Image (cartoon, rainbow, N blue to C red):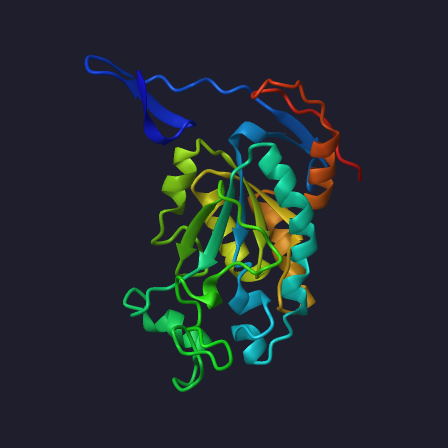
């Protein structure tokens, strides 16, 4: 019988006379991590990591925020933690989803309220405008502006989703992609923590996903109190707050059985 489906996590098997709707049973792969407000046991087989807006316009010298005078130093802080965390998650077969702001060239789906946030007087350099220096258009899909920063590897197995609002769930295929991956738990990283990360995480929690913020893999160019309020509310109201680098270290210490694709991962990260 042949497989019918976008990936092995959600597929049928069929031949000329029969269709088998049963999905492949996947073995739980548990890892326990320190978190707030309580420690967590994650099933890696049902996790995905969403990396929000780690793209040139927000995080790179010469990008949009840098051009308009925003200190991008804080937006670059997650890079080193992501460099340590993402490879470990890939080895553990946790899908990485790059959720980048990437608009249509004609901006036809963007209402004035979205455009105004970034061009309040109508004459500033806003979404879709040509960025001096880079020759790229601000946050436009397929442009340098919307590309992931050079310091972070996008692997062939990773998934890319473009968004057009603070939340990555509104008017995008993100939810469909995650459902097809048979995902229940989402690990969140990226920028800005108090804006696009928080909005996407909140929507995820509201539609039934388990949500975990990887705090060291996230940041904001907003004042510190915005960061603190976002982290407080995530732990208080929506989900959990953990450390991505420590999770990666825990995965590295996990015991694996060679040649067994569905082996259980076990381990506990340090405080």
Decide which of 46, 20 is in the foreground and name it. 20
Number of labelled discs?
A: 0
Image: 28 above or below 166: above
Instruction: Say if residue 1 shows up in the picture.
Output: yes
Q: Residue at x 41, y 57 (%)?
A: 163
Image: 160 above or below 139: above
Whole-percent x and y of residue 157? Answer: 49, 40
**Image quadrant assignment for residue 91:** top right
Compared across the picture, whether 179 is left or right of 195 comes to left
Instruction: Say if residue 215 shows up in the picture.
Output: no
Image: 68 above or below 202: below
Furthest residue to the left?
17
**Image quadrant assignment for residue 267:** top right
Decide which of 207, 22 is in the foreground and name it. 22
Whole-percent x and y of residue 61? Answer: 60, 72
Image: 253 above or below 126: above
Furthest residue to the right?
271
Which of the image's four quarters has the N terminus? Answer: top left
Whole-percent x and y of residue 109? Answer: 29, 64
Compared across the picture, whether 214 is left or right of 179 comes to right
Compared across the picture, whether 11 is left or right of 270 comes to left
Whole-percent x and y of residue 93? Answer: 56, 32
Which of the image's four quarters has the C terminus? Answer: top right
């Amino acid at each position: 019988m042949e497989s019918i489906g976008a990936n092995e996590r959600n597929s049928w098997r069929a031949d000329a006379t029969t269709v088998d709707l049963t999905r492949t049973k996947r073995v739980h792969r548990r890892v326990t991590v320190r978190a707030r407000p309580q420690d967590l046991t994650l099933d890696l087989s049902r996790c995905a990591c969403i990396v929000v807006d780690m793209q040139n316009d927000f995080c790179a010298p010469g990008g949009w925020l840098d051009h308009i005078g925003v200190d991008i130093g804080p937006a670059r802080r997650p890079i080193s933690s992501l460099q340590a965390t993402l490879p470990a998650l890939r080895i553990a077969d946790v899908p990485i989803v790059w959720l980048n702001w990437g608009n249509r060239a004609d901006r036809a789906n963007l209402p004035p309220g979205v455009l105004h946030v970034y061009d309040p007087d109508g004459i500033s350099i806003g979404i879709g405008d040509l960025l001096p220096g880079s020759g790229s258009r601000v946050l436009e899909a397929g442009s340098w502006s919307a590309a992931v920063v050079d310091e972070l590897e996008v692997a062939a197995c990773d998934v890319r989703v473009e968004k057009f609002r603070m939340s990555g769930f509104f008017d995008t295929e993100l939810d469909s992609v995650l459902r097809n991956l048979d995902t229940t738990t989402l690990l969140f990283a990226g920028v800005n923590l108090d804006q696009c990360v928080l909005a996407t995480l909140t929507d995820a929690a509201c539609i039934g996903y388990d949500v975990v913020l990887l705090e060291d893999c996230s940041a904001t160019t907003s004042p510190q109190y915005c960061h603190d309020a976002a982290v407080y509310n995530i732990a208080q109201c929506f989900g959990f707050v953990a450390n991505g680098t420590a999770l990666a270290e825990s995965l590295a210490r996990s015991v694996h059985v060679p040649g067994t694709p569905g082996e259980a991962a076990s381990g506990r990260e340090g405080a």
